[in-house]
Each structure stands twice: as structure tokens, then as C-alpha cells.
Image (cartoon, grey):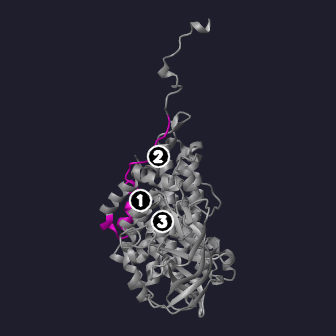
Amino acid sequence: MNASDMTLPHQACLADTHELVNIGSELADYDMYRQDAALVEAVHREGAAWADGALGAFGRLTGSADYLELGTLANRHPPELDTHDRFGRRVDLVRFHPAYHQLMRSAIEHGLHSAPWTDPKPGAHVARAAHFYLQSQAEAGHGCPITMTFASVPALRTTPALAEAWVPKITARHYDPRNVPDAHKQGLTIGMAMTEKQGGSDVRANTTRAFPVDAATGPGAAYELVGHKFFVSAPMCDAFLALAQAPGGLSCFLLPRWRPDGSKNPLQVLRLKRKMGNVSNASSETELRGALAWMVGEEGRGVRTIIEMVAMTRFDCMIGSSAGQRMAVSLALHHCQQRSAFGRVLNQQALMQNVLADLVLEHEGSLALTMRLARALDHRNDPHEDALVRLVTAVGKYWICKRTPQHAYEAMECIGGSGVMEDSPFPRLYREAPVNAIWEGSGNIQCLDVLRAMQKTPAVVEVFFAELAKARGGNALLDKAVAGLKSEFTDLSDMEYRARHVLDRMALAIQAALLVQHAPAMVADAFCASRLDGTSDRQYGTLPRGVDCPGIIARATPSA
């Protein structure tokens, strides 16, 4: 047959090389709150049932396609720095994509930066944590200035004159990103300028110096700061909490970007950090060249002044990592209920069910512990709850944040090759996952803080075991694990060497205790059977026989 004898197909069909079948779809336009059964249960259980309606509306917003796209755009177009304007004037201006500003505005208008301070009713921290958890699933980077603004309030309240002048605008639900003096704004954001090259987490090694000065205006004792800050988080914030060496020792300061007379404070941004994750958020290296600041708290007590701020920021790391786990497993569950391989839908295949159910269990444990600590924050006047915050925040931050990178990877593997592509949400989730484990003190710092808490206030250990005792008799493996954990504390001679091992066991025990008390039996029993059986270094997808994987999967699967 000659080529001329062949009949060409219609021109419109030339590109139809295949039929689009057996492919996934975007997880969008879904109710992020109502379809997260573990979250809804925790909100009601931990004292914020009154926020259910608002959370429902917020969950529909954060799960909408348009809102999720804001997160994509904010990371596709990272911030850019202009040190000077075109005439040569120093401006230190960081420019963000409009999507970033929309996310910031939404977070602030919903009170994620301030609600428990402005309306400290029962369940306020629980409701705020749930909102922050939903918001973080849409985009995590902008949560950095939201968290720091939120956490700055307890530190500033140690100095009434500063609190009176600054806290009303810090807690206002008004977002104003303009590069203008704080006097011209209705709402303010707060960053941090703690870290220096030579010290990192060891802030007592800081060399930035604070020189007392006479200031005609200002809400307190004035100083000028001279030094180099290796990490200044969110440099477009209106002011920063900074640590510097005053004549009386390491002290905390409130450092505004503008002086009271309207002139620019010499807080000069040298460069923006090029980070593997947290791309939407700006982090900078900054010189302080006689920058005016006011002391917060007592001179020489800087670490003590910021300790409550650190508790808040570390708690938000727990929220953010729990949110990352939820988004990762949601995407995996959504994909695996649509995609078939070897003739069967993925979530109906036993081996994939094992993996998916295991990822769900990890998230349920993380969320249960996070929301339990939110309730504790709502009751700091109760000695038991206060001790839980002081001890278990470090335990939870250590465990949940360190588990999240592997969780993100395993969920990505459920998607397969498409999950590795940059137009998938997974590369961003994966790159974001280590941030919370490192920010606000890496794993070793959390371990050391737990040891310090136990040495300084031994009663916190008794409180911890009293919390575990609430689940006594609910699961034999848990009872055995608690008994074994108690034996770890009988000999403290080499506790620092064993600290990670001990914190691993503490984290798993308290997660299991919470699930045994509050989660469906299929979840609690599977968690205990897979995590308290004495084995270590297990991969996801190695759940023991007898686990109700289909039930666990059905409980957690969202639908768009």
C-alpha cells in the first residue's frame, strides 16, 4: 500500500494519543476541618467546642482551591531584598508576592497571632491551635511571623510600660505591611533577632553589645545595640525581640525598625538566607549599628525573659509539624482512593493499606499530644497543667518535629513519581518538614531542656507519670511500656547520653495514653501494638497483624 492510499485522521484528532484514565485529581475545595475527624474530636474534647462553627467556616476557606493556590504562589515567588532605593537611600525593604500578604492578612484577621491574649476564655489556646493547624496546611512559611508575634506578648508583659505601648497594636486584627514607622500603623508584627554565628542555640555566647543611652522618648530604659545577627526571622516585622550583652549581662530588648522620631533605625539587612524550605518567609543576616532598643525584663535575665516566648514558639512547631503530617497523609489518602495498580484500587490493596494506616496513626498521635498541650496552656494556673507545659512541650517538639520529614517522604512515595515533580505539593511539604525540627532548638536542645526541667523541678516527672496513669488498664502494652519507662529514671548517672532514647519512650507513651483514653479502639490498639512492642527502626507499613487498616483509612480520608 502506498502512503498516498492511507487516509489521514481528522486534524482535530492528531493530538489524541491516549485516553485520560486512572489518574488522580487535586485535593481542593474540601472542608479541611470537618473531614479531619481527629481534629474535630480534639477540639471538642479539649475545651473549644464553642469554636466549632468558626472552625468549620475556616476549614472550608483553607481547603478551597483559591486559598491553597496562595500557598503555591507564595513559594513560587520568594521574597526579594532591596537594601537601597534607586536614589541610594537605605531602605532595607523585603518585597513579597501578593499571595504572601493575603495569607498574612487572613491569619491576622482570624486572630491566629493574638486570640488567647485578647479573649482568654476557656479553650482559647485550643481554638487558636486548631486555626493555626488548618492555616499551616495551606502554607507554612508565613506562620513564622505569626508565631513570633503571638509569642512576644508574654515576654513584653514582663515590662508593663512596653506592654502598654506595644501590645494593643501587636494583638490588633489589622495587617499593615507598609515600610513605615509603627506610629502610623494600627497593627504590628514582631520578629526575633537572637541567633549569632558563634553560638547558634547557645545564646549565652552572643557578642552583640547593648550600650545604655539617654532617650527623650520611649517606653522604658533605652540602649543602642551593636553587633551582627546571623538569623533575623521575618525582617519586615515592625520590631524584634533581640538578645544582647548589657553591662549587667545577657538581656532581652525590643528593637523597632523605626525610631520614635520617625527616622530609620540602623538595623541593616545584609542578605536574605537561601533556605531549602520555608521559602515564602524571609530570614536575614543583619547588622545592628547602634540600633535603638528598649530593655524587656530585668538586665542580665534575658534568657529567663524569653523563656515563655520560647514555650509558645516551640508549641507552634508542634502544631506546624502535625499540620504537615495531616496534609501529607491527606494527599496520599486522596490519591490512593482514585489510583489503581495491578487491577485494584491502591487503598484496597493490603500492603498499601498497611502503609496508609501507619501514616494515619502517626498523625493521630501527633495531633492528640499537640491538642492536649493546647488545653494545658489554657490552664497554666493549675500546677499539673503548668508542669506538663514545661516538660512535655520539649518532648513533643522533639518527637513530632523529628518524625515529620520521614512521614512526608513516605506519603510522597505513595504517590509515586508524580509526587517528586515540582508541580506537586510534596516537594514543598518535604522541604518544609525539617524546619520545625531545627528552629527553636534542634533535637539535642530539646533533650537538654527536658533534663534541666527534671533537675530543676523533679516534680515534673511525677506529673508526667500521673498523666500516663489516666490510661492505666486501657492497654496491656501501654502499661508495660510505662513500667519500663519508670525504670529509666531510677539511675540518672548517664541520663544525658541516653536522653534521646528516653524522650522517644516518653513521647510514645504519652501519645499512646492519650489515644487509649480518647481515640477509637482501632486507632489506639494499632498505635500501641505497632509502637510499644519493643522494636526499633521500623519502617512505615510494618503494622502487625490484626489492625483494622480499612477502618483507620476510612476515618482519615478526605473527599474533594
What SS does tag 1 mark?
helix
Residue 255 left/right relative to 491: left
Q: Nearer the viewer, residue 489 or 90?
A: 90
In the picture, which quadrant includes the N terminus? top right
Does any portion of residue 531 appear in the rendered image? yes
The tag earlier along the polypeptide, 1 or 2, is 1
Report the residue at 37% width, 65% height from top: 43
Q: Is residue 23 one of those drawn in magenta?
A: yes
Question: In the image as oriented, which residue stretches furthest toward the front?
Answer: 87
- Which residue range is magenta in the image? 22-51
Of the numbered discs in the image, which one, if any, rests on residue 102?
1
Question: Is mark 2 in CB contact (under 8 Å) with mark 3?
Answer: no
Q: CA distance from mark 1 to mark 3?
A: 13 Å
Q: Which residue is mark 3?
A: 143
Q: Are marks 1 and 2 in contact (CB under 8 Å)?
A: no
Sequence-first tag of 2 and 3? 3
Mark 3 residue element: helix
Q: Residues within 10 Å of mark 1 (few under 14, many from 20)?
A: some
Closer to the camera in the image, 277 or 320: 277
Look at label 1 and name its amino acid: Gln
Look at label 3 and name its amino acid: Gly
Tell me residue 300's x, y (percent).
57, 91
Mark linked to residue 58: none
> Which label was assigned to residue 334?
2
Main secondary-structure element of the magenta-colored stretch = loop
List x then y, in percent, for residue 171. Answer: 38, 75
- Which element carries disc 2, helix, strand or loop? helix
